[in-house]
């Protein structure tokens, strides 16, 4: 055979596809792990603040209880739908204010306060629905819920203490 006439062998197309798929899967797994570390890293374990207080309460529900409570919340929110501004109207107003020259700081602060007020009203409504739901539970179900909540809070406290060391 002549030196220049050697035939190069190509990797079969299916093998290239398999390698590419494997690389994509590895990148996806790395992304999930990195996202989990970013989201749940030690610096993320802080006590609930502000409107985040509800998270331990909702996690302690069974899936069935979560569905029941969710249905009650949706029904309550639907009742007041006609009284609320259209979705994202507050943000559109804020965008208009941000683009206005000269900048209307007082108007922008008022828009933020209005958004906060509506969020506080939704939170209050959610608290009422939660209290009503709890009042309707039988004592044994309420006690089991309290046990799950206690376990979740104890786990959260341990994670916070571990992250602070």
Image: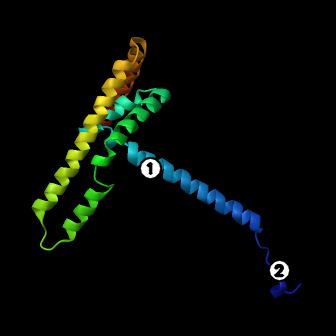
Of helix, strand and loop, which one carries label 2? loop
Residue 121 percent coordinates (x, y): 24, 40
Question: Which residue is identified by label 1?
Answer: 35
Seen in the picture, residue 58 relative to 137 is either above or below; the reply is: below
Residue 53 visible to the viewer? no
Is 124 in front, or is 36?
124
Q: Quadrant of the C terminus?
A: top left
102 on left or right of 70: left
Question: Which residue is identified by label 2?
Answer: 7
Residue 86 percent coordinates (x, y): 32, 55
Name the outermost residue toward the right: 1
Is 116 in front, or is 32?
116
Q: How is the image coloured?
A: rainbow
* Rendering quarter of residue 17: bottom right
Q: Quadrant of the N terminus?
A: bottom right
* Rendering quarter of residue 3: bottom right
For the residues marked 2 and 1, what is the alpha-carbon distance in whole angstroms?
46 Å
Of helix, strand and loop, which one carries label 1? helix
Residue at x-position 28% and y-position 29%: 128
Residue at x-position 12% and y-position 73%: 102
Marks 2 and 1 in Cβ contact (< 8 Å):
no
Seen in the picture, residue 71 relative to 132 is either above or below; the reply is: below
Number of marks present in the image shown: 2
Residue at x-position 39% and y-position 22%: 151
Determine crowd level at label 1: few under 14, some 14-19, many 20+ residues with C-alpha closer than 10 A.
Answer: few
């Amino acid at each position: 055979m002549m030196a220049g006439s050697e035939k190069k062998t190509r990797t079969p197309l299916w093998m290239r596809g398999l390698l590419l798929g494997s690389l994509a899967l590895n990148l996806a797994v790395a992304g999930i792990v990195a996202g989990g570390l970013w989201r749940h890293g030690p610096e993320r374990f802080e006590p609930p603040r502000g409107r985040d207080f509800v998270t331990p309460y909702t996690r302690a529900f069974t899936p069935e209880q979560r569905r029941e409570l969710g249905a009650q919340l949706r029904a309550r929110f639907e009742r007041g739908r006609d009284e609320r501004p259209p979705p994202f109207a507050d943000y559109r107003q804020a965008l208009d204010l941000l683009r206005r020259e000269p900048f209307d700081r007082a108007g922008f602060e008022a828009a933020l306060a209005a958004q906060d007020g509506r969020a506080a009203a939704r939170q209050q409504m959610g608290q009422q629905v939660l209290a009503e739901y709890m009042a309707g539970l039988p004592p044994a179900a309420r006690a089991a819920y309290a046990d799950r909540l206690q376990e979740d809070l104890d786990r959260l406290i341990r994670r916070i203490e571990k992250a602070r060391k």
